[in-house]
Image (cartoon, grey):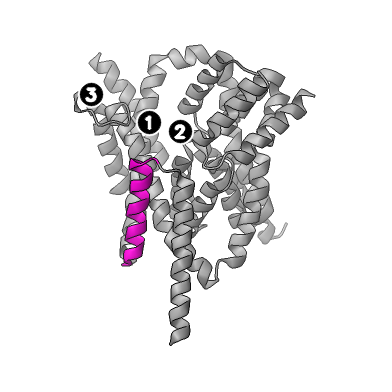
Amino acid sequence: MTTAKQNKLKTLLKLFTSTLYISAFTFGGGFVIVTFMKKKFVDELHWIDEKEMLDITALAQSAPGAIAVNAAILVGWNVAGLPGMIVAVLGTIIPPMVIIGVISLFYTAFAANKYVALVLKGMQAGVAAVILDVVCGLGLKVIKTKQWINYLVMIAAFVATFFFDLNVIFVIVAALVIGVVKALIIHKRGLGK
Amino acid sequence: MIYLQLFLSFLQIGLFSIGGGYAAMPLIQAQVVEKNSWITMDQFTDLVTIAEMTPGPIAVNASTFVGSSVGGVLGAFAATFGCITPSIVIVSLLAFAYKRFKGASVMESVLATLRPAVVALIAGAGISILLNVVFGGQTVNFDAVNFIGLALFAVAFILIRKFKVNAILVMCLCGAANLIINLIIS
């Protein structure tokens, strides 16, 4: 076997085990899993750059379906094309399928167990720390762009979703519109010169 | 053909749930409780609880739970693949479009504006979880502060931010620490 082929197989295997591992340990919604994907694929493996990961998050959020599955599809294509997409999706759906399959057999005992509840509550504190750590890193990058429009979008998006419960789709569409308008203005200025 | 019915029902759930997570819940309820009576409303409430307590997207959890209770292992597969098929088609098209137009200046400008918004969305999700840990809900109530949870969060944050400890390891340690501390106190 050629080394190129071996490397490709190695990448696929790593992609599969990484998505499997992330999916098995990330409790909570889509943004939680996206945060862990950023830690793994951007910070640790350097397969994807930070900007791409944010774009992937926006795309995963805007498309129909589960955010975690959508993000896995995008990461998979990005890292290793069609085979990458397939292994990333499998890695993401196998843990919940196995866990739910087992739990549905003895649900009542599981949910009523106070030790289980305590462990899960403690893990939530850890999840909050992981997410806010990633937010600090990304937020600092946004501040470093030194563009007031970016500050404005970030603050407005936070207030709209967090305090007013605005649907995230509207926030993403609004940011898209602002981006298009900005691009048009820059384009016009460029032509005027 | 129960498998085909499961596949088609979850195909609709996957296709129409935009925004993930809780956006999918009313759709799942409409399909599996109201339209097809595959599970009861009580079972559906249990399902939501399980989905909250276990890893994985709620739509995948729901499809596995409903699929296996209606049609066993094959049912679980039929429902889950129904649920993710729309994503695979639509998101793959988006992936191509992204790759194709990424370098274009208009696309770059749009994406540059989108990124701060995404950071804000992630921040909101993180703070919601933190409030849930510290105050037991989304309202700030200083009579019911969970100091253990707050301390665990603070320690975990420092371990990850300053000492770059593995995130999943920190999360598991938090779970174990919470159990141990509560057992010692009680």
Q: Residues within 10 Å of mark 3 (few under 14, many from 20)?
A: few
From this view, report whether residue A98 is shown above or below residue A111. below
Q: Which mark is residue A123?
A: 1
Q: Residue at x 47, y 37 (%)?
A: A29
Q: Which callout, 1 or 3, points to the residue nearer the camera?
A: 3
Q: On the rendered image, what quadrant is the C terminus of chain B found in?
A: top left
Is residue B83 shown left or right of residue A111? right
Task: Please say whether residue A147 is one of the residues in the magenta stretch.
Answer: yes
Number of on-image labels: 3
Q: Main secondary structure of the magenta part?
A: helix
- Name the element at disc 3: helix
Residues in magenta? A146-165
Q: Position of residue A66 (x, y in %)?
A: 56, 40
Q: Are the residues flagged by discs 2 and 1 in contact, CB closer than 8 Å?
A: yes
- Name the element at disc 2: loop
Q: Position of residue B133 (x, y in %)?
A: 31, 30
Picture quadrant where residue A182 is located: bottom left
User: Could you give the CA–CA distance between mark 1 and mark 3, rounded to whole angstroms?
Assistant: 19 Å
At label 2, the amino acid type is: Phe
From this view, report whether residue B40 is shown above or below residue A44. above
User: What residue would you read off at disc 3?
Assistant: B144
Dots 1 and 3 on the same chain:
no
Q: Residues within 10 Å of mark 2 (few under 14, many from 20)?
A: many
Dots 2 and 3 on the same chain:
no
Query: Circle 2 marks a residue in which chain?
Result: A
Picture quadrant where residue A116 is located: top left
Query: Circle 3 marks a residue in which chain?
Result: B
At label 1, the amino acid type is: Met
Q: Which callout, 2 or 3, points to the residue nearer the camera?
A: 3
User: What residue would you read off at disc 2?
Assistant: A27
